[in-house]
Amino acid sequence: MRRTSQQVIAATAADLKSNRLGLLSREQLQTLNAQIAAFETRMAQVVRRSVMLATIITIAVVLLTFVRIILLPLALAIEVLVVGALLYLTTDFNRFVQHLNLDREAEAVRIVKGRTSRGTLRPHILYHTLRIELQTYKLLDVSLAREFTTGELYQFYILPQSRAIIAAEGVGEKNSIYG
């Protein structure tokens, strides 16, 4: 004996109607605008703190090099690592926010059906990742992760450029023996 379970995550009936047509609803667009603004603010704070930390490390390395505690090749290696990490962090954040802006302009949603995998929630400074079968997608709101049951079949509504999950609905069937 089988029964279907309906579960809606992060969406209203109007949102799902638009999402099933491959479009963002007005409410989702407003939420996305607010999230982009928050990410830009957060990105600016993280970059500012990173530059400050890089400056402090650079000053410490230069002082330790002048005092001859650190050799010049080691000091250069440390500086290359610091600058490389700062560049990676900045470009990663910038690319993610650019992808969200492209999604906002396109107002399109991609539909993906799949099952969530165990232990796949990974933190990032701006988002968390969730593995759906063989692909990894982003969750802008970490509280959404608690809504998903491992192994259940869901229909996910995803922003195509940023690969962020904006809504989902449970469409799986549960076997009454295990339910």
Image: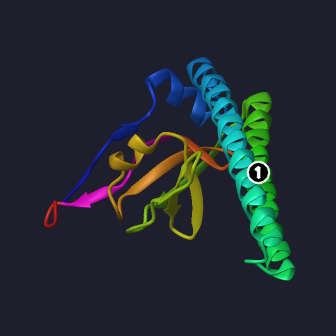
Is 147 left, or right, of 46 in this rendering?
A: left
The C terminus: image quadrant: bottom left
Q: Residue furthest left?
A: 177
Image quarter for residue 69? bottom right
Q: Residues within 10 Å of mark 1 (few under 14, many from 20)?
A: few
Q: Position of residue 28 (x, y in %)?
A: 58, 25
In front of the other: 38 or 63: 63
Q: Which residue is mark 1?
A: 55
Q: Disc 1 residue type? A: Thr
Magenta residues, as a range? 167-175
The answer to whether residue 161 is visible is: no
Image quarter for residue 72? bottom right
Does 39 sit above or below residue 135?
above
Task: State the scheme by which the image is colored.
Answer: rainbow
Q: Position of residue 165 (x, y in %)?
A: 56, 45
Question: Which residue corresponds to the image point at 80% horizontal and 71% vertical from the top-left?
Answer: 65
Is 153 left, or right, of 15 in this rendering?
A: left
Regarding mark 1 in the picture, which secondary structure is present there?
helix
The N terminus: image quadrant: bottom left
Question: Which residue corresponds to the image point at 46% horizontal and 30% vertical from the top-left?
Answer: 11
Number of marks in the rendered image: 1
In front of the other: 71 or 40: 71
Q: Position of residue 142 (x, y in %)?
A: 44, 44
Question: Which residue corresponds to the image point at 43% horizontal and 61% vertical from the top-left?
Answer: 116
> Magenta segment, principal secondary structure?
strand
Question: Which residue corresponds to the image point at 71% horizontal and 59% vertical from the top-left?
Answer: 57
Image quarter for residue 115? bottom left
Q: Position of residue 174 (x, y in %)?
A: 25, 58
The answer to whether residue 35 is visible is: yes
In front of the other: 98 or 92: 92
